[in-house]
Structure formats: structure tokens, C-alpha cells
Amino acid sequence: MKARLNFLVFLSATLWAVPFWGQETLSPEMHQRVQKKNNMTPMQLADYLPYIHPRVEDPVAEGVSLDVPLEVANRPLAEIGVVDVTAAPFNADCSGVNDTTLAIREAVDFARDHQMVLFFPPGTYRISDTIECRQKLTLRGNGRLTSAANFPCVLVGSTRPGKRSVLLLEPHSPGFDDPEHRKIVVHFTNCNYGFDKSDYQYGPLHPQANISYNQMLKDIDIVVGKGNAGAIGLRMQAAEGSSVQNVTIDATHGHTGMLGAAGSGGSHHNLTIRGGRIGIDTRGFPPEGRVDGSGTQPTPTMAGVTLLDQTVAALVNKSRGPLIGVGWRIRTQTTGPVIRLERDFPSSPYNGGLALIDSIVQFTGAAGEVVCATDKSFYMRSVYVDRSKRVVDGIAADANGWTLVEELAYPTQPPRFKDHTFHESVYLHGERSEQPSVHIQPGTEPPHDLTSRHIWSNSFPSFQDPRAVNAKSTPYNAAGDGMSDDTAALQHAIDENEIVFLPKGYYRVTDTIRLRPSTKLIGVAGHLSNIMTRAPFGKLGEGGRPKPLVETADTVDADTIIAHLGILLADEAPGECVKRHNENLPYYALSWRCGGSSIVRSPHIARTHLYGYPLRQPDGIEKFRYSAPTVRISGHGGGKWYNFFIHGLAKETDDYRHILVENTQGPLAFYHLHAQHADSYAQCEIRNSENVNIFGVKSEYQTRFLKVKDSNQIGIFGHGGNATALRGSAHYVFIDSDNVTLTNMSDQFDPRLDAPFSIPYKSHPVEPYSAYGPLIEIREGKVTSLPSNEDPVLWRSTE
């Protein structure tokens, strides 16, 4: 009782201090600037101020503060950027005896406000109400209200073998008992800044999912206790950097395992859901969306998903763009359908599709009637179905054994919208068809690694790994302060150790950091542990060619890992430095040349600004333009990349690429690739390469997404996003390349737009969809294009 009273005293003191930050610290001048910049009334600003974080000034403006709060008792974890939820002042009970709802809620807010990770040591945490993880807002130096990308909610559990961190919703918790009025157990949400159009009528707490960045739930399980038939285990409709990883949800006594999903640079991996009526439901949730509308960001991508014994459906999908599922296992005792695909509103003709790849569907009771019921086009490849009469209406399977769906493209034509007609067809070797393309083989059982080949192993390293060496510890003594030169310290640690951990900080380097084939370089979170540089650049600025901040070994048998780590590029420097390099940035982020079982997981490779967005640029500071690719994959470069995202406006040459893949034989796989906003010829490029698969693309631009040249065995499975191509061009350009497969082309656009319009800071206008096509193929100079009102469910190159 005494401990609870002490906690409530701390809680009340903290709540008194935090909400009124804006009123206490904003100067009258800044008040006026914020109102003017954001077109707000004084009353609107007063409503929003409690939800605005103060601007971080240094070492990187509008970045991450390196101050360590004094309140937290677990000092070793605090020093690396982690808050222990079981330590003072929160003292959450991990024995499963006491209710920890209030303690966890306050710890979530505290860790968010101090830009730290919230850690749940192994054990059971009893809760009786929703744990809300709400990302707030922050200010730029020019007064613009913006997303608080560096103030996310990051909840992390135990990675110790056999020692899980579990959130247990107590039996018969208030408000969770009614399936007609569902309630969420763990809810990641955020605030809006006027929905990009100064619309403040709903107040700050109405979510705006497209600016919900870097939210994370990792290595924490959720269990719904008895008597909670209306419980939804988890909801995270979020964008760049947001992810659910290594999570099991037991919804046996609940309604839905996970509602909605991340996309737009966010994705989910290694997720298991047991029981419930529905495993994953991507429809909306008020007030953010209608219950009969979409509840995702574009192109949600999920690898390594297991859905077990749901009583209604394993998946109900109404995603924005397509949902991309790779390495799934579905088990059901019903007769199906286990997958339901629902059509969105006619103004969004391409939403709601599905690509399911390297997956298993098992009927363990009576023989299944059907796997999939659909109003939408979908695509399957290497899907093994056990004991079902049909895959979908019109496509038979073996009710008594296994059926291998080698490839199935199932087109369903969208309804007309006003005067607009849209098509989702199949294009094989130059021929168009509106009929399904079916390749099915009976009697074939799945290989043992069909799903596991798409996910990392259970021994994946983390900051909790006893083998991990802290780069700030003796004898390495990296400073991580954004100003000191940490090149020698980082290289020393890498040369002597396999697993090197970078705590929260900015690690400035002046020469390329070179990884060994076995190096595992890990951070506490992608936005918190950052490798970067600033002038003077040292060896990075020498020579005639751009140099990478980080470079891997060039070997086929590597098991290199980069995980939860940022590599930042800043385009500002003193004017004489910019001129000395002919205005071209003399360095780039990453040269990736390792293959084998190498992995990049939840990186934060970004183009940033040392001074943020100030009212005035500092005297003497000028900006570079980007010419070298931010990421170059070459040599033996391959492996698996999870949740890569990059965005932001900058000056670029026309041959700049966010990612350039060149002269590599792979295999290389991206599990969600989000690259956008560049004004160069294309966001990404693949040339003279083989065996590259991209599972889930989301992008925004006014040029092109991908150029593929002189390459072979290239797969792009799913495309979405509010992008428009250059007039007369296309999202994809394939030049003299063989065995190229593109599926689930599902871009979002406004069909009402009938003329181009310009947008600030962009070289090219937003075009109506009729001005460009989905793809262009150029073979020996001959150009073939698809109609502008066609988004194919399957397209394969003519050779």
C-alpha cells in the first residue's frame, strides 16, 4: 500500500509538470511564430501545447537529447538509453501478482518524453486497462508543428532464452467483455498536426497515422485472460520505422489478435497469434478510421507470421494498397474461408489486395471448403494447402492431402468510379488476360524451412546479450556526443569483438568504419544510436570519390548484422567546405558487400539536418547536394533487409539513388522497402544484378520508383503509396532485363484529379493518373508500356 501511495505521489507530480511545458517555456515571440506558421488560433494553440515536446537543440537540432534523467534508479540501463519498468520510480511488479497498469502507463510516457527505450525484464505484468502508447508532436526552429519522430514509444522485452516478458490482461477486466464494443489492450497511436492542411477541428488527440514514426513493440507477449470477449490484443497503425517484432498474442479469450497494421516504412515480423475470432484484421477503428474502412498505412508487409485456431478467420484484409505476407503459417479447425479480402471504396480501386508467398494453410478438422473468399485481386506463390476443396472459387485443391499453389494470379476487376474504369489484369510475356493464371501441383508437402527462411534466428543479438561489448566502455571509450571523433574507438571495438553495442548517442566518424564478416553492430533503437559525421570530415573528405561511413567485408559467406542502428547523412557544412567538394556530398551511408546469412534489421539510414529547420540558417553554413547513393549494395552484397525506409527533401543530382544495387548475384531480399521524395530519375536502381526480391514497396515521389537494367531474376511483390510518375513515364522502368516479376501493383491516387499541380520544394508536379503508367519495358530499344488505368496483379517480362 505504501509503495502504491508513493507511486501516486510521483505520478501526480509528474503529470503536473509535463502537460504544461508549452505554456511555461514558449516565449511570446515563439507563441506568435507557431500560431502564424501553423495557421492556428490562440485557443487552438492552447489545446495543442500540452502535446508538444520541446525542441532538442544539440548535438543535432531536432534530434535526440543525450541528457540522462536522474529519476530512474537502474543507472546502468539509463546510461545506455533504457528505462527499467520494474525499477524506481515505477516499480512495476513482474511477478504477476499486482496490477501494473498505472505504473506501465507512466513509464511509457516517461521513456517517450526522455527519448529512451522502455524495457520489461522477464516476467508477467498484470494489467486491467489499455496501455496507450501515444506519440506526441514537436516544434521546428521555424515554428512549424511536426511529428515527434524522435519521441516514439519503444517497448522492448526480454531476449533471454525461455524468459519472456508477458502483459496479461486480467480476467474480466472492465470494458473488455463486449464483442460489439471492442477495446484494445496495447494501443500505439499518436497526435495530429492538422492533417497536413491546418485542420484542427478534431483537437490534438485525433490520430494521424502517417506521422506515427519509429513506434516499436518487440519481444513482449500479450495474453488475454478469461471473460474478455471484446478484447483486441494490439493495434499499431503507423508509418516509418514502426514495427512489431518477436511478439506472441494469445487471444483465445478475446476477439482479435491484431487490428490494423503499419505500412509506409513500417512493417511487422515474427508475429504469432493464437485463438480469438480473427487473427489479423486490417480494417479501421474509430476515431482514426471507419470500422468498414481501411486501417493500415500503404503496403503493410509481414514476414514470419503464425495464425493458429481462429474461430472466424485468420486474416480479414482491407489494407491500403496490398498486404504482403511472406513465410506465413495458418492453422484452422474451421472449414474456411480462413482469408477474407474486402473491397475498399470505389475511389480507391486498388486497395485490399494480397500477396501470399512461401506459406502454409492447414485445415485440421473437417476438410476445408475454401481458403480465400475475395472481392479483390490476389497473388500466391509457393503456398501449400492441406486438405481444402478449393483455394478460391473456381480453383480446386485436394480435400484429402496437400496442394502446392506454385503460382496463382487471381484478377478481380474494380468497380467503376464515376467516369473512370480501372483494371487489375495478368500480363505474361506480353499477353494480357483477365482470367486467373493457375499453376497448381497436388500431393506436394512443404519443405521444413519454408517459413523460417524468411526470419532471423532466435539467437539474434541485442543489448541484453552477454556477448555484446559496449563501445563506450573501457578500453574503447567512444564518446557518442556527436562532436568527438569516435572513429578509432568504434574500429577498435569492431576489430576485437563479434558483437558491438552502441548505446544511445551520436557517434561521429571521420573515416570509414570497416566491418568484419562476422561483425554484429547493434544499437538500442534505430533513432537513438547513430553513426554520423560533421565537418571537418577527415579522411571521409579526401580523394575524388565519395566514401561510405560504414563498409562491410566483401565476402559471400558472411553473417554480418546491422540492427536497430542509425547511419545519418547531413548536408550542411561551412561554405568553403561545400565549395571545395563542388557542392557534392563527399560521403554516403553504407557500402554493403556481404552475403550469406547477413541481415539489416530496422535500420534508420537517413538524410538529416544538423541544424534542423531553423528560422534562419546559421551564418557561413551552406548545403551539399546528394550525388552518390545513400546505400550501395555491390560485390557479394545480399542477405535480408527488414523495414528499410528513407525519405525527406534535399538537393540531388539526377543520378542520385536512395539505394543502388549493382554487380551483385544475391540472393538479396527486402522485407518492406520504403524510399521516397527524391527528385532524381528514380528512387532506387538495380543494374547488372541477379536474384533480388522486394517484398512490399511504398513510396511517394513525382519521378519514378525503380529502374532495373541488365538484370535477371528480379521480383517486386506489391507496390503502394501516393506517388505519381513523370508525365509520359512510369513508376517502374525495366531495361534489357529478364525474368522480372511485378505483382499487386496498387498505387493510391485521387481519380478526380484532372490536371497537374505543383507542390512546395519539388521540381515536378503531381500528375493525374492518366498522365503516366505503372511500368515501361525497354528491350533492345523497343518500348512497351501499360495503360494508365491498369495496375496488374501479375506482370512478367517478355523474356
Image (cartoon, grey):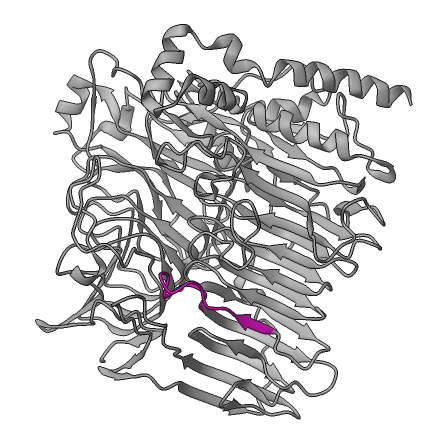
Q: Quadrant of residue 511?
A: top left
Q: Quadrant of residue 81?
A: top right
Q: Main secondary structure of the magenta part?
A: loop
Residues in magenta?
339-353
How many marks are shown on the rendered structure? 0
Question: Could you tell me residue 370's position as x and y percent?
Answer: 59, 83
Q: Eyeballing the image, is 519 above or below 745?
A: above
Q: Which residue is nearer to you in this view: 311 or 750?
A: 750
Residue at image position (70%, 57%) is 180
Question: Could you tell me residue 169's position as x and y percent?
Answer: 79, 46
Question: Could you tell me residue 799's position as x and y percent?
Answer: 23, 80
In this rendering, would 371 be left or right of 249?
left
Q: Is residue 359 magenta?
A: no
Q: Which residue is nearer to you in this view: 309 or 423?
A: 423
In this rendering, would 63 be left or right of 24?
left
Question: Could you tell me residue 449's position as x and y percent?
Answer: 59, 71
In this rendering, would 428 be left or right of 5?
left
Q: Eyeballing the image, is 179 above or below 659?
A: below
Q: Is residue 347 magenta?
A: yes
In this rendering, would 584 be left or right of 238?
left
